[in-house]
Image (cartoon, helix red, strand yellow):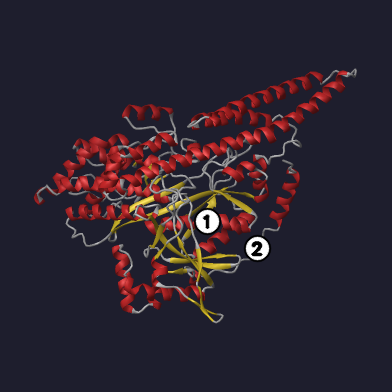
Amino acid sequence: MNCDRKGIIRAVLNRAESADEELKPFTTDCFGGDVFHFTRMKERLPKPIYKKLMDTVAEGQPLDASIADAVAHAMKEWALERGATHFTHWFQPLTGATAEKHDSFLEPVGNGQAIMSFSGKNLIVSEPDASSFPSGGIRSTFEARGYTAWDPTSPAFIKRGRNGATLCIPTAFCAYAGEALDKKTPLLRSMQALNRSVKRLMKCFGYDGSANAKIALGAEQEYFLIDEQFYYARPDLVQTGRTLFGAPPPKHQQLEDHYFGAIQNRILAFMTDVDSTLWRLGIPAKTRHNEVAPAQFELAPVFEELNLAVDHNMIIMEVLKQTAEKHGLVCLLHEKPFAGINGSGKHNNWSPIYGDINLLNPGSDPDQNAIFLTTLCSIIMAVDKHSDLLRSATASAGNDHRLGANEAPPAILSIFIGEQLADIIDQIEKGSLKSSKHAGSMRIGVDTLPALPRDTTDRNRTSPFAFTNNKFEFRAPGSSQSCAGCNIILNTIVAEAMDDIAALLEKVPKANFHSGLQAILQKVIKSHKRIIFNGDNYSEAWKKEAAKRGLPNLRTTPEAMAALIKPENIALFKKYGVFSEVEVRSRHEIFLEEYQRKIRIEGELSLNMARTIILPIGSKQLSELVKTIAVMSGCEIKAGLASQKAAAETIGKLLDGIELECRSLEKALAAKDASAKIVESMANLRKLVDTLEKRVDDDLWTLPKYREMLFIN
C-alpha cells in the first residue's frame, strides 16, 4: 500500500481550515417538518377516519383496511409537497442496520401519461425479497417471501439525500409463516407484555387498570469522528470499523482535557448540521459534547416512548454517518475503534410509566412510595434472576473489546441503587423500621416506614445497571447495537417479576395490604439482594465477591449467547408471547454466526495487513539498517555501530516473531469454530506490530497513526 501520510495530514489541515459553513437558521416551526405525525394527520384526515386511526394506535392493532386508502392518500399528498418521489417500507432486520426498498409514486396510465399513486395496500403491507436476510433456519434460502407491515405508532418520515427525498414508513418484518425476522416485532410484543403486567400490579394498589402502561427511553449515543482521508488509508477501519494495529500515542486521554472541552469549529459545524437534520425528523436531540477520548463525542435526546425512541436511535446513527460524509469525516460507531482508550457505548435510560405516573419516581404520599418500592423490587428480582439474558443482549464482537475496560461496566451484571435506597432496602429486609440515614418528608406505605427524600443517589459510572433518580441506566449496550435488544429482554423479565409479586399481593386481604406488601418485599429482597452492589465494579475484589455471590461473569459473546437457549429462558419468552422457541433459537444461531464471521474477517485482514503492509515496512527498515552497518563497518568510525546492530537485531527479531504469529493465525483461520484462537492470535500479533511501529523510521510507516487520526481533524 503506497500511502503518503504527510500528504494526507496536509490535506486534512487544509480542509479543517475551510470547515466553516453557513447553515440555514432553524426555528421551532421546522421541528418535525419532515414527519407525518399525528397532529399533521389530524389536519389532513376526516374526523371519523382520524378517530379510527387513533383507536388503532392506542390498542396497537393493525390498521383498519376500510380507512387505509384515505390515510395513504393524505400521506402521499403531504410527501409530494415535501419533494418525495418514492416511498419505502423502512424496517429493522437482524443485520443490526435498517433496510429499505424504494418504489416510486409514479404510475403510468397510458398514452404517455402518468399519475402519482399510493394505495392503502401500499401503506399497510409490502413483500420485499427476504431470502438474503439472516433467518437462523426459520426459512430456506430459496423461500424468498417476507412481509413488512406498517407500525402506525411510529410516524412516517422523509429521508433526504443529495438528489431526492423518500417517504419512509416504519414497519415490522416477518416471514411467510408469521415468524418475526426483525427487531421491532418482538419489541412491540414485549411492550404489550409489560403493559399487561403493570396493569395487573397497579390493580393491586387500587387502580382500575384502564390506563395503558408505556416505557420511556432516553438513549445516549457515543461515537468517534476522524477525517475520511485517514479512514480510507486504513484497511482495517474500512473493513472492520476498528484498528487492528496501532500503538497508542504518548498523549491520548490521560490528561482528561477532552471531556466536555470546547468543541472545535469543524466538529461543531458537523454537530449543528446533525441537530438540524434530526430536528426536522422530529427527533429531540438535546445534548452534544466532547466525550472522554480524543475524537470521541456524544449525542443525547430527550426521553420518548420506547418504540419511537428505538426507531429514532436507528435514524440518529444513520444521520451521524451521512452527515459526517458531507463534512469530509467518517463516523465510527464501533465499540472499540482504538485500543488503549475509551470505547463507545449506548446508555439505555429506561423507566416504566402507568398513565402519568412514573413508577420509578418516589412520590409525595405513602401509596406512591409503596408503588415505587414495589417496582424497584420487581426490577431487582428481574435482573438477579435473568442477568444472563441481559448480558446476552449486549454481546457482540465489538462490545467484547469494551466491556470491562476502564470506561465501561464489566460483564458481571449488578445493580447500583445508592446509599439511601440501600439503607431502606436493608431495613425492609430486616424488618427494622428505624429512620433512614437521611431524614426527609417521604414515607413509604404507612407512617412507620422510613423516610425517603428525593434524588438521594450519586451516579456510579462503573455500574452496568444504575438507578439514577427516576430511571435505570443500563450502560452495557454497545454504541453500534440497536436499543431494541436490551429493551426486549428488560421488558420481559420485569413483566415476569411484576406478575410474580402481583400474584402474591392478590391473595393479601385489603385490611392487611401494607403489612402483606412489606412481607412480600422482604422476601424478594432476601432472595435477590446479591445483585445489589454500590461499590467499584472495576475492582478485582468485586470479581471475587461476585463469584462468591454466584453472579455469572460471561466475558465473551459465545458464553453470553448461550443464555438465550436455556430451556427456562425459552419458556419465559414463550409465556409472554415475545418469542416462539423457533424465533429464540434462530436469533441464537444468527448472532453467534455473525460473531464468528466478524472474528474471521478480522483475522483474515490482520493476516493480510501483516504480510502485505507491516512485514514489507519492517523489511525496508532492516534493509536500511543493514546497509548502514555495512558502510560503517568499512570505515574507521565505530561510534554508533553497536547501536545500529542492536536496532537491526531488534527489528529482525520482531519480524521473525510477526511471521511466526502469522503462521499461528493462519492455522487458526484454517480450523473450524476457532474464534477464541483467532482472537488470541490477533492479540499476540498486534503486540508485535505495535512494538515494531515504535521502532520503525516514521517516514517508512505508511499507515496513519493514532496521534494523527485522533488529534488532527
Q: Could you tell me which quadrant the N terminus lies in?
A: top right
The picture places residue 340, in percent across and down from the top left corner, at 57, 36
Q: Which mark is first along the chain, 1 or 2? A: 2
Q: Closest to the observer: 593 or 17?
A: 593
Q: Position of residue 286 (x, y in %)?
A: 48, 58
How many other residues sit within 10 Å of disc 1, few (<14), some (14-19) or many (≥20)? some
- Classify 478 as above or below 405: below
Q: Position of residue 338 (x, y in %)?
A: 58, 40
From this viewpoint, is residue 480 visible?
Answer: yes
Q: Nearer the viewer, mark 2 or mark 1?
A: 1
Asked whether, in this view, residue 580 is left or right of residue 258, the answer is left
Is 193 or 73 nearer to us in this picture?
A: 73
Task: Residue at the far bottom: name it.
Answer: 111
Q: Residue at x 67, y 58 (%)?
A: 19
320 in relation to 463, above or below: below
Q: Quadrant of residue 218?
A: bottom left
Q: Which residue lies at the image location 22% right of the left edge and 39% below the top edge?
A: 524
| Residue 705 locus on image (x, y percent) | 67, 39
Task: Report the residue marked by disc 1.
Answer: 318
Check disc 2 and report the residue beneath it.
21
Q: CA distance from mark 2 to mark 1?
A: 21 Å
